[in-house]
Image (tube, helix red, strand yellow):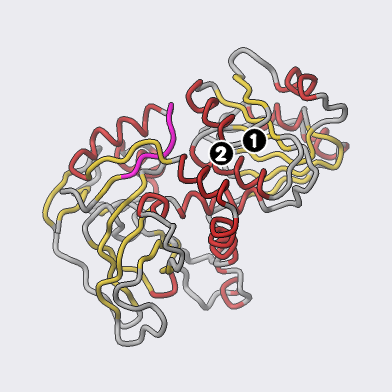
Amino acid sequence: MKALYKAGPHAGFELVDRPEPGAGPADVKIRVMTTGICGTDLHIQSWDSWAQGIIEAPLIAGHEFYGEVVEVGEDVREVKVGDRVSGEGHVVCGICRNCRAGRRQMCIHTVSVGVQRDGAFAEYVVIPETNAWVHHDPSVTPELGAIFDPFGNATHTALSFPLVGEDVLITGAGPIGLMAIAVARHAGARKIAVTDISRPRLDLARQLGADLAIDVSTTRVRDAQRELGMREGFDVGMEMSGHPSALPEMIDNMNHGGRIAMLGLPSQEITIDWGKVVTHMLTLKGIYGREMYETWYAMSAMLSSNPVLHAGISAVVTDTLPATDWEKGFEIARSGVGGKVVLDWTRL
């Protein structure tokens, strides 16, 4: 099979022939149709300090994908050959305290597809049956199915706190921040403000339902509050950027008792006013991945019941390229000015 392969501890990928993976007794083998390019994949490609600390090459990367099941192991009970699926990329142990309590997203032995085990930048990928999410809704296209993983990040973050009637601040209008706008609107938020410095992404934010898209290179969030007619600060914050200035400014603009969900991974240490966190009684919650599998049920239910949300999430995919054009796809993703980039593995 063709695969994007990192042969050793160095920068770059190669599109080469690799052996097809075999399915174990509890596994499903999937013919990959589409894959999304994630920030994690950019780190692995460039072989930066983060990648060097967590990746063991050789490796096939890629963890956002959609495809068709072509083989199932003898112990597989529900997933069938021919099912169209997306994949939950966190493979858990099943026996640690959190797994046994039904909190599998908090497994202390998690192994990630495309990070610690071979992933989906290939014509075939193998995952446990429990990690395959079967799409029963025919309106889920291969492009939409490829971004269920990041859509799940957005959904997990956005639904961490009640949103009905609340004023929401989202810092970072990358693909996940953009999808969080649509989820927050679906969930009943009153006003939604989004920050970024990319004009194309801020334009996408407006299309997805943001009341105000703030270019923080020229405008401060406090000024945006006045423009929205707010008096007391934001009720819910979603930090999606990881930028060192985003969280401190968010804290400065939260109402007393405000709640902040943090998904963005900081690229450096962040200094915040902990006195304000205490005296303003703020709640900060870290978010990683998706709730397994409540988030997946929520995603499918929202998409099937809300055509506006369906159209909005689909519109986050701004570029779809043949997998053979992977280098161009990575360049577009790294530029940080558009939405989601998807590679089509049916075009090789």
Disc 2 marks which residue? 177
Specify the quadrant of the image occupied by residue 280.
Answer: top right
Q: Quadrant of the N terminus?
A: bottom left
Residue furthest to the top: 218
At a point 70% along the width and 29% down the height, the residue shown is 248
List x then y, in percent, for residue 279.
88, 37
The crowd level at tag 2 (other Cα within 10 Å; few <14, some 14-19, many 20+) is many
Up/down of 139 relative to 129, above or below: above
Decide: marks 1, 2 in contact (CB < 8 A)?
A: yes
63 left or right, relative to 246: left
List x then y, in percent, for residue 337.
43, 26
Residue 189 is covered by the magenta coloring:
no
Report if residue 180 is visible in the image.
yes
Q: Nearer the viewer, residue 113 or 209?
A: 209
At a point 30% along the width and 56% down the height, the residue shown is 120
Tag 2's secondary structure?
A: helix
Mark sitting on residue 170:
1
Tag 1's secondary structure?
A: strand
260 left or right, relative to 331: right
Report if residue 106 is visible in the image.
no
List x then y, in percent, for residue 152.
53, 54
Q: Amino acid at mark 1?
A: Ile
The alpha-carbon separation of the residues under discs 1 and 2 comes to 7 Å
Up/down of 207 relative to 164, above or below: above
Q: Where does the magenta region start and end?
A: 337-342
List x then y, in percent, for residue 189.
73, 43
At a point 30% along the width and 30% down the height, the residue shown is 331
Q: Nearer the viewer, residue 163 or 50?
A: 163
